[in-house]
């Protein structure tokens, strides 16, 4: 069952603030320019972040919209749950769910119209029926299940299983009307919701009458048949190709370069954050053959993403316990990479050293930092691809 929303945390990290700023900027530009005409580069420039930063938090424009769906859903739960706890009448509980939904999304009414042109496409990942929208759709359906089960209304057991999905579809019809509703404050939508909730609650009450049992069973069978037809249509008609062997999930990853001051330090910080956010439980370390000290620009480049590696220190590869490593990733390009003698899977990502001397930017701190940003962004891309090989 759906858990109550988490309490809002007052203090956001730098990364949380950056993520919020990018999302707010994207929503503003989508309203101004339209979804199709807004690029990730334009969003990054308007938000005052590097393009790589934007892609670090959101892999695509579609990811931004999914984050918008999640945000409005969390806001909906925060308004809805306290009111549901004080009410047991089914009709009133359903009205609470719809009213709080409309309260939550009303500030985005203009944007919803812009988004609808893309989300209405059956093949769009932004479609509410798409696989990408599954998590938000599932949580919204669970909310309707909670509204039904928490009421004093007894619902036939066979109907209980299908009712949350039916109520979600009903609420999607209300949302579609709301998108096209030009009345002040969506007054017509609220009127429609109030009147139809009375009808829906009445139909649910009637569904339990003995005389309507055959009708109820025929309707539920039709729903099951439709679901089975949809599943059958989605099955492949040709012999499926065998999937490529997946890389096993690593237990300990070691990033290696020469000085352990820039590339490997950034890789360690980025990997730790990526694996921690996904609950992978992987030990991440970095080292070098001739360790020096962590480059301040490496710290600055990661701090732009809200990642603080100020406590990192350069380490010799000799200090690493081989028992803690099963995957080694070397990052050297021009230099000779350190030799690791332990038993481990070896990968090589040749990346130019952003700290290498360059007369062109000797007196230009901004250009030197830009080189570290390029390396950081390349590491973000490679780490995501690396994780997809074993996490899917």
Image (cartoon, rainbow, N blue to C red):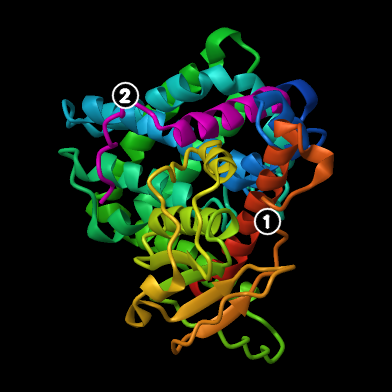
Q: Which residue is mark 2?
A: 10
Kindly identify which numbered label has been placed on residue 113. Answer: none
Task: Give how far across and how far down residue 138 sits, in percent.
Answer: 42, 52
- Label 2 – label 1 distance at C-alpha: 33 Å
Q: Observer-nearest residue: 357 or 62?
A: 357
Kindly identify which numbered label has been placed on residue 378. Answer: 1
Residue occupying image coordinates x 27% and y 39%: 147
Tell me which corner region of the image, top left, top right, bottom left or bottom right, holds residue 385. bottom right
Residue occupying image coordinates x 74% and y 49%: 357
Task: Give how far across and how far down residue 95 sits, in percent.
Answer: 34, 26
In the rendered view, would you say 100 is above or below 373? above
Q: Observer-nearest residue: 9 or 4?
A: 9
In the rendered view, would you say 2 is above or below 300? below
In the rendered view, would you say 107 is above or below 39? above
Query: Does any portion of residue 123 appear in the rendered image?
Result: yes
Give the magenta range.
1-30
- 209 vs 391, left or right, is left
- 137 vs 119, left or right, is left
């Amino acid at each position: 069952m759906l858990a109550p929303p988490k309490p809002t945390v007052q203090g956001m990290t730098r990364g949380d603030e950056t993520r919020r700023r990018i999302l707010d900027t994207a929503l503003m530009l989508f309203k101004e320019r339209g979804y199709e005409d807004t690029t990730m580069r334009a969003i990054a420039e308007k938000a005052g972040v590097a393009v790589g930063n934007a892609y670090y938090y959101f892999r695509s424009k579609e990811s931004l919209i999914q984050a918008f769906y999640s945000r409005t859903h969390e806001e909906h739960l925060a308004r809805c749950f306290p009111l549901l706890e004080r009410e047991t009448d089914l009709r009133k509980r359903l009205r609470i769910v719809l009213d709080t939904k409309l309260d939550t999304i009303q500030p985005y009414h203009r944007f919803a119209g812009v988004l609808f042109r893309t989300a209405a496409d059956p093949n769009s990942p932004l479609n509410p029926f798409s696989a990408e929208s599954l998590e938000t759709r599932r949580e919204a359906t669970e909310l309707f299940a909670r509204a039904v089960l928490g009421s004093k209304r007894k619902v036939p057991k066979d109907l209980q299983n299908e009712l949350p999905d039916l109520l979600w579809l009903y609420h999607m019809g209300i949302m579609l009307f709301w998108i096209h509703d030009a009345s002040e404050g969506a007054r017509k939508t609220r009127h429609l919701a109030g009147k139809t909730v009375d009808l829906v609650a009445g139909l649910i009450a009637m569904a339990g009458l003995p005389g309507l049992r055959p009708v109820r069973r025929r309707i539920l069978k039709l729903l099951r048949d439709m679901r089975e037809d949809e599943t059958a249509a989605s099955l492949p008609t040709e012999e499926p190709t065998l999937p490529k062997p997946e890389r096993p999930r690593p237990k300990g990853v070691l990033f290696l370069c020469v000085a352990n001051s820039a590339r490997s330090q950034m890789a360690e910080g980025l990997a730790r954050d990526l694996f921690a956010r996904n609950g992978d439980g992987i030990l991440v370390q970095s080292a070098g053959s001739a360790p020096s000290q962590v480059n301040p620009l490496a710290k600055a480049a990661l701090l732009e993403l809200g990642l603080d590696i100020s406590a990192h220190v350069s380490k010799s590869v000799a200090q690493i316990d081989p028992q803690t490593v099963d995957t080694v990733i070397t990052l050297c390009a021009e230099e000779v990479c350190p030799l690791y003698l332990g038993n481990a899977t070896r990968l090589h990502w040749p990346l130019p050293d952003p700290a290498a001397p360059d007369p062109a930017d000797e007196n230009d701190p901004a250009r030197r930092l830009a080189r570290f940003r390029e390396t950081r962004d390349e590491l973000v891309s490679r780490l995501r691809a690396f994780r997809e090989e074993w996490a899917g």
